[in-house]
Image (spheres, rainbow, N blue to C red):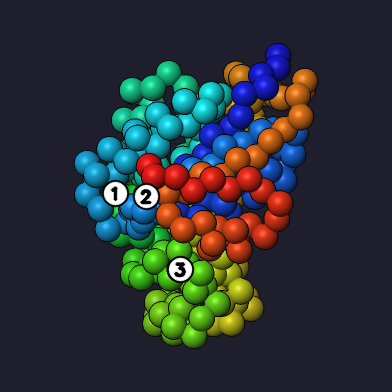
């Protein structure tokens, strides 16, 4: 079974490129179309209805680009909108959720930290996930201001480091041994986070798991690209400079009014 159409991905901005990297690494022969809705970032402070509206709009854009499956490369959009997307559109969706399960199952201190957006931490889906781990203390922290800083290309700034320190210090004091990154933007903060966390605290994000799930869905339901040269297109509805800098490669980046 083969299918030469591209994999579609969308996020509230450039953060979902961390998910795209994992998919591209695992499936280098697949074409991909990535949509960065940076104009509307961050999603984490928006209402559920707004997030659903934007997610539908993004989905329709990717369907117009002939996507064969869509990766919702945004925790906030997944936790607030994927149920509606799956009921409305006849295409497989792969979502991204905070990787609580591996952290909780492997924690020796039975205490883990979750750094995520307000939209993710206050969602019904996240609340239900937490209930599955009654024996694990889960310390939740909203990453106020982090997404805008990353969207401005300031992930390595002192301002970002100070903000992270204020969020992570209480978690360290609470004896976490795993930190779950619950936003696809946050893997770009790992170098800064490692400056703050003691070396025994492990950092987990969802990128590899999403890539493996994408491969599984292609294998079981859709088919791989086997008969055409793969392409990668990035679309963004804001200034593309930060996206160019973070990708740091010879990719096609299209600025558009969307």
* Picture residue at 41% right of the left edge, 64% below the top: 147
Residue nearest the viewer, comparing 83 with 171 = 83
Mark-to-mark CA distance, 1 and 3: 26 Å
At label 2, counting other C-alpha atoms closer than 10 Å, the crowd grade (few under 14, some 14-19, many 20 or more) is many
Residue 196 seen in the figure: yes
At label 3, counting other C-alpha atoms closer than 10 Å, the crowd grade (few under 14, some 14-19, many 20 or more) is some
Screen quadrant of the N terminus: top right
Decide if residue 238 is on the left or right side of residue 208: left
Give x and y (percent) for residue 31. Answer: 66, 33
Badge 3 is on which residue?
152
Decide if residue 65 is on the left or right side of residue 237: right
Give x and y (percent) for residue 85. Answer: 36, 30
Residue 137 seen in the figure: no
Screen quadrant of the C terminus: top left
At label 1, counting other C-alpha atoms closer than 10 Å, the crowd grade (few under 14, some 14-19, many 20 or more) is some
Dot 3 or dot 2: first in sequence order is 2
Q: Secondary structure at mark 3?
A: loop
Q: Quadrant of residue 53?
A: top left
Badge 2 is on which residue?
76
């Amino acid at each position: 079974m083969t299918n030469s159409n591209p994999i579609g991905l969308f996020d509230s901005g450039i953060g979902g490129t961390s998910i795209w990297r994992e998919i591209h690494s695992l499936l280098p022969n697949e074409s991909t179309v990535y949509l960065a809705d940076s104009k509307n970032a961050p999603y984490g402070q928006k209402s559920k209805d707004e997030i659903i509206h934007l997610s539908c709009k993004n989905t329709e854009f990717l369907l117009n680009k002939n996507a064969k499956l869509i990766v919702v490369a945004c925790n906030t959009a997944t936790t607030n909108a994927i149920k509606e997307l799956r009921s409305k559109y006849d295409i497989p969706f792969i979502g991204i959720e905070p990787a609580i399960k591996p952290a909780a199952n492997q924690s020796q201190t039975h205490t883990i930290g979750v750094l995520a957006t307000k939209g993710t931490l206050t969602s019904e889906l996240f609340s239900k996930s937490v209930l599955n781990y009654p024996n694990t203390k889960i310390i939740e922290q909203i990453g106020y201001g982090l997404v805008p800083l990353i969207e401005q290309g300031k992930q390595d700034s002192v301002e970002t480091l100070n903000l992270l320190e204020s969020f992570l210090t209480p978690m360290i004091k609470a004896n976490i041994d795993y930190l779950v990154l619950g936003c696809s933007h946050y893997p770009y903060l790992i170098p800064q986070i490692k400056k703050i966390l003691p070396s025994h605290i492990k950092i987990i994000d969802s990128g590899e798991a999403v890539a493996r799930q994408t491969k599984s869905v292609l294998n079981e339901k859709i088919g791989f690209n086997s008969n055409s040269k793969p392409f990668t297109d990035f679309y963004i509805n804001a200034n593309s400079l930060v996206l160019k800098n973070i990708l740091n490669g010879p990719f096609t980046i299209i600025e558009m009014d969307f």
